[in-house]
Amino acid sequence: MRENTVRSKLSGGGMVVNGWLQIPSSFSAEIMAHQGFDSLVIDMQHGLIDYQIAVTMLQAISTTTTIPLVRVPWNEPASIMKMLDAGAYGIICPMINSRQEAEQLVRSCKYAPKGNRSFGPIRASLYAGSDYAQHANDTVIVMPMIETKEALENIDEILGTPGVDGAYVGPADLSLTLGCTPQVDQTEEPVVKALETILAACKRHKVIPGLHNASSSYALKMAAKGWQFVTLASDSRYLAARASEELSAMESENRPLLLKSY
Amino acid sequence: MRENTVRSKLSGGGMVVNGWLQIPSSFSAEIMAHQGFDSLVIDMQHGLIDYQIAVTMLQAISTTTTIPLVRVPWNEPASIMKMLDAGAYGIICPMINSRQEAEQLVRSCKYAPKGNRSFGPIRASLYAGSDYAQHANDTVIVMPMIETKEALENIDEILGTPGVDGAYVGPADLSLTLGCTPQVDQTEEPVVKALETILAACKRHKVIPGLHNASSSYALKMAAKGWQFVTLASDSRYLAARASEELSAMESENRPLLLKSY
Amino acid sequence: MRENTVRSKLSGGGMVVNGWLQIPSSFSAEIMAHQGFDSLVIDMQHGLIDYQIAVTMLQAISTTTTIPLVRVPWNEPASIMKMLDAGAYGIICPMINSRQEAEQLVRSCKYAPKGNRSFGPIRASLYAGSDYAQHANDTVIVMPMIETKEALENIDEILGTPGVDGAYVGPADLSLTLGCTPQVDQTEEPVVKALETILAACKRHKVIPGLHNASSSYALKMAAKGWQFVTLASDSRYLAARASEELSAMESENRPLLLKSY
Amino acid sequence: MRENTVRSKLSGGGMVVNGWLQIPSSFSAEIMAHQGFDSLVIDMQHGLIDYQIAVTMLQAISTTTTIPLVRVPWNEPASIMKMLDAGAYGIICPMINSRQEAEQLVRSCKYAPKGNRSFGPIRASLYAGSDYAQHANDTVIVMPMIETKEALENIDEILGTPGVDGAYVGPADLSLTLGCTPQVDQTEEPVVKALETILAACKRHKVIPGLHNASSSYALKMAAKGWQFVTLASDSRYLAARASEELSAMESENRPLLLKSY
Amino acid sequence: MRENTVRSKLSGGGMVVNGWLQIPSSFSAEIMAHQGFDSLVIDMQHGLIDYQIAVTMLQAISTTTTIPLVRVPWNEPASIMKMLDAGAYGIICPMINSRQEAEQLVRSCKYAPKGNRSFGPIRASLYAGSDYAQHANDTVIVMPMIETKEALENIDEILGTPGVDGAYVGPADLSLTLGCTPQVDQTEEPVVKALETILAACKRHKVIPGLHNASSSYALKMAAKGWQFVTLASDSRYLAARASEELSAMESENRPLLLKSY
Amino acid sequence: MRENTVRSKLSGGGMVVNGWLQIPSSFSAEIMAHQGFDSLVIDMQHGLIDYQIAVTMLQAISTTTTIPLVRVPWNEPASIMKMLDAGAYGIICPMINSRQEAEQLVRSCKYAPKGNRSFGPIRASLYAGSDYAQHANDTVIVMPMIETKEALENIDEILGTPGVDGAYVGPADLSLTLGCTPQVDQTEEPVVKALETILAACKRHKVIPGLHNASSSYALKMAAKGWQFVTLASDSRYLAARASEELSAMESENRPLLLKSY
């Protein structure tokens, strides 16, 4: 079976730099896959991406050695299993708040006897190899998202669930439930403390600490603290940011007023 | 009929900052449309974009006041007329090298008696208004691309063709036919001279001088010389450039080697 | 944040005329949006419409000032949250039969602390504005469908749920569970009485009474009784009805038999 | 090979009532196919329809006995042959203005020795039967559009071209080139006279006179004059017309002002 | 209402040969539909198929008399009801392990009072006829999948559930939960015994015994034992198998080494 | 630049076994790419494949080392250049009957000064590498189809055109123009002789002799005669053939009558 290099890099104590896809296009995915990210997450929760186009994005990523991961929209067996069959090498699942939810997530990701994933790795066996069935349970990464106050309280039960490989933190949702501003690259105290709590719990449970960031500068700081799986901003952010900067540069003295659309 | 603000800004001597779409997605198009470009070109020649998805991109642009333009893949009546019917407010057409080709381009863009555009503005009349038929010939912009040695030689015949509103220069192709490196933001002598020739011809014929650029810095320099319709880099460039920069920033001392895909 | 004019019109005691989309096409959606409906519902339950094409329909509607609403297929967090992120300004949810189901629906539509909607308004913030996060909870409309005998019995508990903005009645399903013919524009006694019950409950709880109709004549009668949010027939109905009428007109004496397909 | 009932009805002197598809959707096509039209034209010129979705529309029509025809965007071999391979039972081709153009059109529609259509009826042989190769040349209908002043002048040369089965008149374009208002259901004198000229020429050459109409009332009048292949309005017209009527009906005294979008 | 010939053939004691679709394409579906299968299952669980393309596949199958069935991804009301509305004549549902789950499945497939299926057979009424509402409950086939150890233990409770028409066995999943190799055409003892148990239970409950097979040879053996609804291999298997055989044939002496991709 | 292994194998005197794609699906393309073909042709002429889905098929093939080629629908610059920009490593072009047509084909495939291909290898440079511009002219394969009587007569002029890399024979069209049955794996005398003529001409001009076949047995015979680039049957043929065989095997004594659809 094709190696999951994200798993091997992390288990060796290394860092993984992850990219984030929210534009529904196999071409933008292929561009991103050629930039050199260790892994790319197809965001099917907040990205404008549904199943059929996600499959073409998985194919686009597979033209490179970048590892394809998926954030599913919710902790539902159907969408999780479909994305694994399509070749995702890891599942990030939002809003895991309890041991029970973590166990259900793991079950959806693992074949019996560890779970109840249904067998039919239709594209996964093309991508991974014909021995997919034997190794899938040990290769696919399972990362519940820790992003609520409730999850914080149940952090040990969640991270101690057999089959859980890490914690992925969504700072915006975490901020909301802690009464802070919903944003990434947080510096507000309650969130900063919560992040420390989660990081410590990950170390305690020997699972991957993963964090969603909006900039390389913040990501580097967090990596220095021990976060191993760090995401930079999404493709849609990159696009908007760069276009906006270039447009601002055009607003010279002799052309002060740019048309503001909407 | 909805005003073509690109035309009015340019006829007032102003500059138009144009964006360029090569990713086949109505969402990336909508993001770009919200950044504040005066106009956006859907590039159906070198962009990975076909008719059906181009229509959804026109719709996405229409959610803002940014003016939608199209670069067609070739000087063919079918694709030109279909994009106009879909609501394009201007056509940029590659490889116009002679008076005859310029006249054919104009004919495809104009209703009788000025041309042979077939009548059926199915979406254009939604976008532009029910009086589209009366004003389309005067509203839609027609810009042949000047991008070969042959076109340079025939520049006066081309730009003097009734109905031609401007010249759009593709520096990469122009470079190739002049024996230079195929690239944008050119500084090689033969291309620089050719650009001056074209700019002068535009002024002489009182048509819009339009130029494809790769950066705001180069675009500003060219605008200062008199280029009025200036394009910045494409969405796919923005995406690749920003992602690449962010990844480079992650290559700190303690993580010198990033996985290079492919 | 862009105003939700449906909410403002209704809160002023006015009527909202709503259209209904079941054809999976951004073009038919754009045509409908240009007719002058106050709002349009993309029907993802019985319409032949899935997520990816629904997004392009939201974009098409956004080319006008018509307010985009969505009927989701079921009371599931994933599909509700995805459509809100995509820019829906209201959710109509089928088969809400109890207080518990109503509360779950509200939670999926509201950010903490009022609910557990996950944060990531990727397209919503383009459509609504950059202050979406602050105002979304008060702008987005939440309308459970009252369409079963059980819901009738629990009507006060459902409509009294904090965050519920109205009741939307699906007469066909309501008819079925009351032992009547599954149809719209109902005149059968048990359904007529049930409608009166629901209308009275809406007034009592000061929430919007909404009704699905098949014709303007019936809708006008119901509006006169106090129904404020009235839907006319769907795009697919309009298409079939008008084509059928025109074909019938062609069956003159000298051409009595038209080919009947299937 | 499956019979082309349009051909048999017309050759028997009968009338064919044709429908017109401009919405890019296999579902709206299937709805139209179930209304009872003798044939349906997928309009790939002015309709918002490209190849890939046209194929699904051909499949949708094939669920009934309605005969599928296609209006191609232009007189180009590639698009004509692709649509025939996909199962179109007739080609309507715009802007045929001379004998030479008519001959080229016929060549694209016929296998050697009558033409240069390339062999590969990939879906046509599913739809028509395995003996497609033997009968296609005699089954597929070829209808050049007569819609310009120039075509009027060359009418006998065009209609006398071997392989031409009829003339299809596009009144809007014809009007434009005759200096009249571009519209259907014409009553302006020059167009009315031109229509008579074309009808007479069709009778003289024993080919099908076909006319694009906007209403059954006009179509009936023209059928009475001898037009055999009559088209009613398009799906997009039906949709807009019916929705608009229903909305107007809602503008009662107590709700005089409807929001006008755009 | 159009007859469900699968039901009538089976109730007469006959065998039904079923095909299996996993390629997301209306064209491959149409090819399969023309081969002569009694029915075709669109596999939305392990096939790479989502809702929107499944609809076009239903249309493709409807061009023939082959009966369209659907395997849904999971026992969820939303996806089951959407596929029924789109015209599926039967639902195969994975992982039904208890009476409770079987009852929920039946409820999703039946209108009140037998279930809680919501009314709106938008395409189903085109395919089946305008009397769909009256006959749907008796026409649509409901087949839970028996594919776990737990389901085996609850076999009588599941098959005895009113509204259940049969049992469909997925041998790969059944194998996994019995500690065997996940494969079809099983000969391992525990699975063989389990298949006998299920077959006997089907006979006892007078419901259809259905089995997923990988070859006609195995299917024939199982049919001889009494399995009435037998599936052959999927379209994707056929494609891979035939291509692979032909390539092997090309490996003659003078070309021993074929490029092995990946 | 990524090596074109088809070119290197052939120039070494070896044989290339080519596959043929007519199903519009990136998944079926990926399955085919994993079987071990040296190259795969996306057939945009007779296959049911348009530009946008062809791009995803190119991506699917790029997940393996199989070389992606394209048969364009016609000798038109627009479609040829778009497919090259999308990453095709070779163009097979139908109906090249004269020196003039061959020269136009070459021009569309080569950058100046050898041709007039426009510069913008948007996806090609991802697939091939950033030095695409320097090597594309020498890497991309240009194969005109020899498939008419006229082409036979001009065979030396066509194959002697600078830039032409080979001849690809379409036996069905060749048969038609020679008055034979339109089929592949031909044994009719006039076609057999024509094939010998073409093969000899290829050897004389030192270009690749390429042949479309329907079976490995025929392909092997032709390879033995010296045909170097041999195609086996298409994906759609494989699918239909294997399904049909399996269904025939099910027609045992106790089930003599299979439903014949259509």
Image: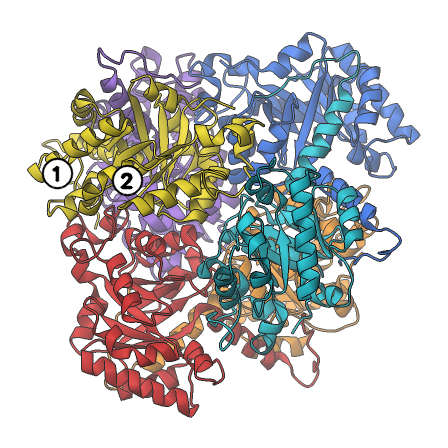
Chain colours: A red, B orange, C cyan, D blue, E yellow, F purple
Q: In which quadrant will I find the N terminus of chain F? A: bottom left
Q: Chain of mark 1?
A: E
* Residue F119 appears in the rendering: yes
Q: Position of residue D44 (x, y in %)?
A: 62, 37
Which of B165/C214 is in front? C214
Name the element at disc 2.
Answer: helix
| Kind of residue at disc 2 | Ile
Which of F172/B155 is in front? F172
Q: Position of residue F156 (x, y in %)?
A: 38, 29
Q: In which quadrant will I find the C terminus of chain F? A: top left
Sequence-first tag of 2 and 1:
2
Which of F67/A2 is in front? A2
Query: Residue at horizontal 61%, vertical 28%?
Result: D33
Residue extending furthest toward the left: E189
Left or right of residue B235, residue B83 in this image: right
State how far apart marks 2 and 1 are (Cα). Answer: 19 Å
Residue extending furthest toward the right: D189
| Mark carried by residue E158 | 2
Q: Position of residue C84 (x, y in %)?
A: 54, 64
Q: Chain of mark 2?
A: E
Query: Residue at horizontal 78%, vertical 11%?
Result: C254
